[in-house]
Amino acid sequence: MKIGVVFPQTEIGGDPGAVRAYVQAVEAAGYDHVLTYEHVVGADPSVHRGWNGPYDVRTTFHEPFVLFGYLAAFSSLELVTGIVILPQRQCVLVAKQAAEVDLLTGGKFRLGVGLGWNHVEYEALGMDFRTRGRRIGEQVELMRRLWTEESVSFRGRYEQVTGAGLCPMPVQRPVPVWFGGQSPRAYERMGALADGWFPQVPPGPRLEEARDIVSAAAIAAGRDPSSIGMEGRVDASYADPEELRAHVDAWREAGATHVALNTMGAELASVDDHVRVLEESAAVLGIS
């Protein structure tokens, strides 16, 4: 099982030097990958009365593809989006950006995608919030063709391409597409389409229920469920090292192929504090 970290988007701030120092420290500590969340814009609660989303207009978010282009210049870590909100973005442009990141990293990129929840963000990007579930499957189909075929003609309900292709192509053909989500319909979509998934529930009965739906959908689509990766997430701020180790081991026993340690939201005062916790966690887990 590969162990990575969740990039502390909301707390790292805008200093590129801090971003670089964090990622270099993570790599030196022995982690395998960096996973980042995304939001393009945040809603202003003074305008959107009653706003109760976890993020708003004051919450820091670096744009993942631009960030990864920067990281690829000095890091050999695998870079992972967990997730990009695919239906609010132009599909062909995402395919191009993903191909470029994959090329710059030498094939060490996973494109995690999902539907998102923020209608304000969809409006700002000129996309229809109501059709996001229907669009994402079509988008993934088109992206995979763009990553593997020189010239593509595609006529879907939402996407159209006529005799066009990407150049240069990615190293991985196709780029791995992982899915996030936490509804039965999302689990069915994962089983039918995804190379891997990010469960939003911990190991236990709820995870098993979700995995049963993923597996059944995979079999119905003629796919092998065992070929679908799974990445868990663990709070890295546990004071007790044994508790941290137990949570990571629980994901390993549940069959996870990857796990990411998360320090975001742990009320750490600085980038140095995030790094300290991750270095200590690496020592506990024997990966340093």
Image: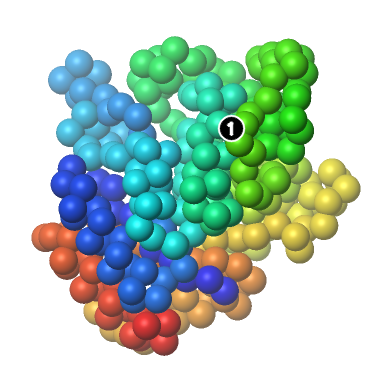
The quarter of the rendered structure image containing the N terminus is bottom right
Tell me the quarter of the picture where residue 280 sits. bottom left
Residue 12 shown left or right of residue 283 in the figure:
left
Q: Residue 183, can we see it?
A: no
Name the spot of residue 79 as percent of width and height, x first.
Answer: 46, 54
Residue under pointer 1? 95
- Residue 226 appears in which quarter of the rendering? bottom right
| Residue 3: percent from left, percent from top | 47, 70
Residue at left offset 70%, top offset 57% = 228
Whole-percent x and y of residue 259?
49, 66
Nearest the viewer among 102 and 207 is 102
Figure check: 139 above or below 154? below
For image coordinates 21% across by 23% down, the residue present is: 44
| In-front residue for pair 276/219 | 276
Front-most of residues 259 and 240: 259
Residue ranking furthest to the front: 168
In the picture, measured across the screen, residue 13 lies left or right of residue 102, that is left
Q: Secondary structure at mark 1?
A: helix
Residue type at tag 1: Ala
**Quadrant including the C terminus:** bottom left
Q: Residue, x 44% and y 75% (percent of image)? A: 247
Q: How is the image coloured?
A: rainbow
Residues packed near mark 1 inside 10 Å, few (<14), some (14 to 19) or many (20 plus): many
